[in-house]
């Protein structure tokens, strides 16, 4: 049995860490890295599954894993004399998604944080339990 969930930073508070964002912006959007003041996630959307494997004798195992991640970022940079803020969607279709979960199974399950490395195209979604 599998239940599907969607968690977003708009509805649920979880951290989004962006790695190599300045290099990605310079390569994809041709923004001079020296002008970038800050980069942050404006919206992160994680589609994830909670799976229970059952047998006649009971529950064999249960697991959580992310299946899709969407991301929009806000970039604040200097343009001449002015400071500008621009939002960019990030295409994550070619990124590898890994899911890390706690080995303690008590309480509720939710997305705890997301780490996205734009340089090596890697996403790690942390799904932990609240205690």
Image (cartoon, helix red, strand yellow):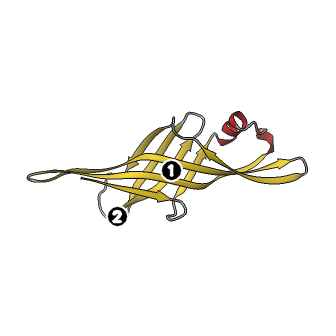
User: Secondary structure under badge 1?
Assistant: strand
Name the residue rendered at 8%, 53% in the picture: 57
Name the residue rendered at 51%, 38% in the picture: 93
Left or right: residue 129 compared with residue 11: left
- Which part of the image, by quadrant, shows the C terminus? bottom left
| 120 over 2 or under it: above or below | above
Q: Camera-side residue: 113 or 97? A: 97
| 127 over 92 or under it: above or below | below
Q: In which quarter of the image is residue 3?
A: bottom left
Q: How many marks?
A: 2
Name the residue rendered at 63%, 39% in the picture: 20
Q: Camera-side residue: 82 or 17? A: 82
Name the residue rendered at 59%, 39% in the picture: 118
**Residue that numbered label 2 is attached to:** 108
Q: Whole-percent x and y of residue 14? A: 51, 59
**Residue that numbered label 1 is attached to:** 114
Q: Camera-side residue: 106 or 13? A: 13
Within 10 Å of disc 2 (Cα), the crowding (few <14, some 14-19, many 20+) is few
Q: Whole-percent x and y of residue 116? A: 55, 44
Q: Whole-percent x and y of residue 4? A: 35, 55
Per the model, the C-alpha gap separating discs 2 and 1 is 18 Å
Left or right: residue 1 compared with residue 118: left
User: Secondary structure under badge 2?
Assistant: strand
Left or right: residue 124 compared with residue 60: right
Numbered circle sitting on residue 104: none
Q: Whole-percent x and y of residue 21? A: 65, 42
Within 10 Å of disc 1 (Cα), the crowding (few <14, some 14-19, many 20+) is many
């Amino acid at each position: 049995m599998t239940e599907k969930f969607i968690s977003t930073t708009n509805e649920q508070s979880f951290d989004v860490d962006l790695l190599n964002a300045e290099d990605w912006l310079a390569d994809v959007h041709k923004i001079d890295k020296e002008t970038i003041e800050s980069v942050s996630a404006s919206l992160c959307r994680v589609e994830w599954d909670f799976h229970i494997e059952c047998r006649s004798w009971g529950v064999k195992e249960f697991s959580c894993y992310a299946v899709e991640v969407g991301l929009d970022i806000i970039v604040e940079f200097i343009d001449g004399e002015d400071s500008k803020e621009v939002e960019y969607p990030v295409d994550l279709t070619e990124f590898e998604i890994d899911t890390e979960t706690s080995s303690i199974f008590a309480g509720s399950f939710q997305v705890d944080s997301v780490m996205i490395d734009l340089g090596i195209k890697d996403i790690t979604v942390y799904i932990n339990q609240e205690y």
